[in-house]
Every structure is written in structure tokens, then in C-alpha cells.
Image (cartoon, rainbow, N blue to C red):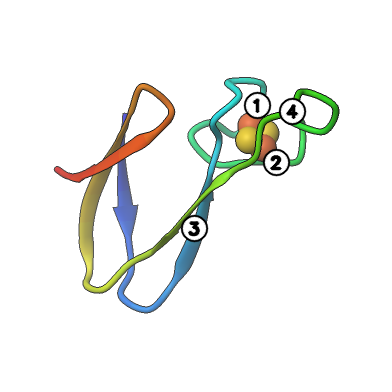
Amino acid sequence: MKVKVQEGKTYFLCSCSLSDKYPFCNGAHKGSGKRPVRFKAEKDGMIEFLNNEEIVEA
Ligand code: FES
């Protein structure tokens, strides 16, 4: 899933697949042993979150 990001903003991406706001973390990971993946955008653009762990420019 591709996500639009803005330079300077920090995003927390869901690594547990439990978030109803996926690909963003909404706190649903609590108790799952998983933690969100933090990403700070260095420029405006699109990213893609692959396999709940890898972030690539899209
Ligand atoms: S809800 Fe999935 S990591 Fe937070």
C-alpha cells in the first residue's frame, strides 16, 4: 500500500496488521509483542510499506 508523506513529518507504521488504520499504527498492537515502525520523511513523496517491515520510495 502506497502512502503519501510530507517532509519533516514522522509516521508510525503498523507491523502487526491489527490496525484498522493500516498502514498506520493505531495502538492495536498492545499485547502482541509487536511495535510500530517509525519513519521520518526527508522529503515530500510516496512510500510503500512492504511485508510490515521494509519502507521503500514509491
Ligand atoms: S497497531 Fe500494528 S504496530 Fe501498532
The answer to the question of whether label 2 and label 4 lie on touching residues, with beta carbons closer than 8 A, is no
> Which quarter of the frame holds ligand 1?
top right
The span from disc 2 to disc 1 (Cα, nearest Å) is: 7 Å
Discs 4/3, front: 4
Q: Nearer the viewer, residue 26 or 56?
A: 56
Quarter occupied by the N terminus: top left
The span from disc 4 to disc 3 (Cα, nearest Å) is: 20 Å
The answer to the question of whether label 1 and label 4 lie on touching residues, with beta carbons closer than 8 A, is no
Discs 1/3, front: 3
The span from disc 1 to disc 3 (Cα, nearest Å) is: 16 Å
Nearest to N terminus: mark 1 or mark 4: 1
Tell me the residue that label 2 is attached to.
26
Give the SS element for disc 2: loop
Q: Within 10 angstroms of label 2, few (less than 14), some, or many (20 or more) residues?
A: some
Tell me the residue that label 1 is attached to.
20
Tell me the residue that label 3 is attached to.
11
Nearest to N terminus: mark 2 or mark 3: 3
- Left or right: residue 20 compared with residue 15: right
- Three-letter residue code for mark 4: Gly
Quarter occupied by the C terminus: top left
The answer to the question of whether label 2 and label 1 lie on touching residues, with beta carbons closer than 8 A, is yes
- Three-letter residue code for mark 2: Asn
Nearest to N terminus: mark 2 or mark 4: 2
Discs 2/4, front: 4
| Residue sitting farthest toward the front | 33
